[in-house]
Image: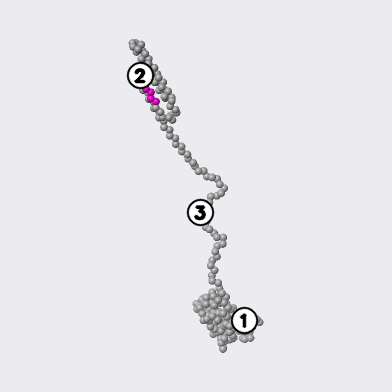
Amino acid sequence: MTGPNADHHSEWRQRLMSKEILAAFITGIFSLSGGFVAGAFKGSAIGVGPSVTATVTATAVVTETATTTVTAQPVASNTPIASAEVAPSVSPNPPLPSPSPASVKVPLAELCGVTGASGYCGSSFVGTIQVGGHLFAYVGATFDADYPRPPDWSRILHFPANTCSELDVTFASDDSNGGTTDSSNLQVLQTVASAATANAAHGSVGHLKVMLDGGPFDLEANSTTGDQIFVNGYALCASSSGI
């Protein structure tokens, strides 16, 4: 088509195409959804006259970071929490301390028979006498031709170094000898400890208890009237022989 009508028609077509392009542009914008889709729209119209190009670019980046903080809450309980400290273990039956060596009661007659012991005592010197209306059993005695008077002494037993801790001796004179003023005397001499002495009136039994020092000891006796003195007793030792 030529002439004025042709120019008019061409202009009308260009306007129509521009309206279509604009409509397509708007449609492209509304076709994008919520910013969560990245897209591009590009429309081109080619015809007689100037070219119109429309470009729409939409980009949406969504980053979601979820942070959850959990706080431990104390749990109520009727059970107490055990302490970190542990109490020392206590045995219901604690061990007993080690006992000291048992003491053996050794009769004086057996001490007299130990090797190294000497005197007038033992199995050869056993008997009884009458003292204060009672019988007194003896295992040793003074045995001198002339029984000593103070300050002299007659040895009944000499005993060597030993394991004994105590010596317990009874002594007396026979009622048939001496007078009412007679006194019987006994003493123990040791290596370290001082001499220990005791006396008994006529008609009574005397008693002497001595702590021993472990060294040799002598058992001696005398009387104020020169009478014979008789003895009996025992020792506490760590062994049955006392050595």
- Say which residue label 2 marks: 47
Q: Say whether residue 191 is left or right of residue 10.
A: right
Q: Earlier in the sequence, mark 2 or mark 1?
A: 2
Report which residue position mark 1 lands on: 137
The CA distance from mark 1 to mark 3 is 69 Å
Residue type at mark 2 is Gly
Residue at the extreme bottom: 145
Taking the magenta stretch, the answer to whether it contains residue 51 is yes
Position of residue 70 measured from the top left corner of the image (x, y, whole percent): 49, 41
Q: In the image, what residue type sits under mark 3?
A: Glu
* Left or right: where 125 falls relative to 215: right
| Residue 220 seen in the figure | no
Task: Give the magenta range.
Answer: 41-52
The residue carrying mark 3 is: 85
Q: Residue at x 52, y 57 (%)?
A: 88
Asked if one can make out residue 110 in the rendered structure from this viewpoint, the answer is: yes
Q: Nearer the viewer, mark 2 or mark 1?
A: 2
Give above or below for 239 relative to 4: below
Residue at figure coordinates x 62%, y 83% from the top left: 128
Q: Quadrant of residue 173?
A: bottom right
